[in-house]
Image (tube, rainbow, N blue to C red):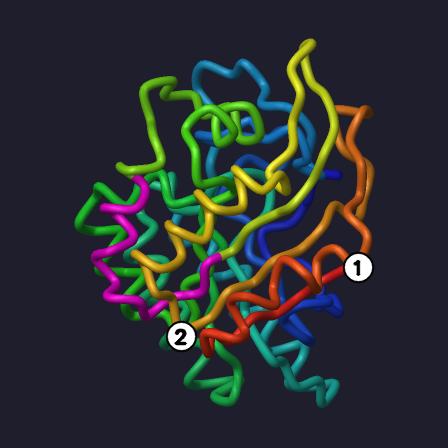
Amino acid sequence: MLFSEIAYGPIHSRRLGVSLGMELMPLNHKLCTFNCVYCECGWNSPVVHPELPTREQVRLALEQKLLALQAEGTRLDVITFSGNGEPTLHPDFAGIIDDTLALRDRYQPQAKVSVLSNSTQLGRPDVVSALRRCDNRILKLDAGTDEMMRRIDMPVNERLDVRQIEQWLMQFDGDFTLQTCFLRGEHAGLRIDNTTPEELQAWYGSVDRLHPRQIMIYVIDRKTPEEHLEKIPREEMLRIAQPLQEQGYDVIISC
């Protein structure tokens, strides 16, 4: 499922409310630093010179959409950057965030600006600074062990490890939402399961080191590129959340 507009929706997000989506990646294929087995956008495409919308194209598309929503009386809960890959890959990501905040303040001041990111670009100071200016930083960590993270997310940088992601996330001093997809299945002959006692213990350790202000755990909800995946039952998701809730963490469970 690819998004074919720069500004699309609004849609009713099960996690964020009435959300206007923003697409900074190509409109006809996925471009990401991960190749997650569960991504609703499918697998990465081998494109050498991808065409990204310019900063000005993004600004114009957003303003036109906000004007139309204002005319029809639609109120947004959130403007969300996600879409066909990793939004922070855009070279003008910081400037686009500045434009978005200014337009939000003019047309939909009650709306939050949120970014869903896989955390792989947090080594760039411009990305970190831009994310700090947003209302919601929703940042991914799908496993507490390197092997399971690589099986689930299949990072383009094969040397990327959980400890590096943790160090990048620590730059926010806990002021972010940690997002994790729980799943079981198989890919390329390898077992995938981040719900085992060993994997959960490692992930809980990451949570305690990062101490995020909010934790968002969810299950696969749409068709996935790898067909041999299993949706985790709600009862099990509640059990995964319980130890964190008992410690006082704010945990959102989307099933």
Secondary element type, mark 2: loop
Left or right of 223, for residue 26: left
N-terminal of the pair, mark 1 or mark 2, is 2
- The quadrant in which the C terminus is found is bottom right
Q: Which is nearer the eye, 34 or 57?
A: 34
For label 2, the residue is 135
Whether residue 155 is situated above or below residue 13 in the rendered picture: above
Q: Say which residue appears at 69% left-offset and 9% top-offset.
A: 189
How far across and down, in percent of the image, does residue 199 sit?
Answer: 53, 39
Left or right of 173, for residue 119: right
Is residue 166 rendered magenta in the image? yes
Which mark lies nearer to you, 1 or 2? 1
Whether residue 55 is situated above or below residue 235 in the rendered picture: above
For label 1, the residue is 234
How far across and down, in percent of the image, does residue 134 sit?
Answer: 36, 70
Q: How many C-alpha atoms fall within 10 Å of the one at disc 1: few (<14), some, or many (≥20)?
A: some
Q: Which residues are magenta?
A: 165-178
- The quadrant in which the N terminus is found is top right
Q: Which is nearer the eye, 31 or 213?
A: 213
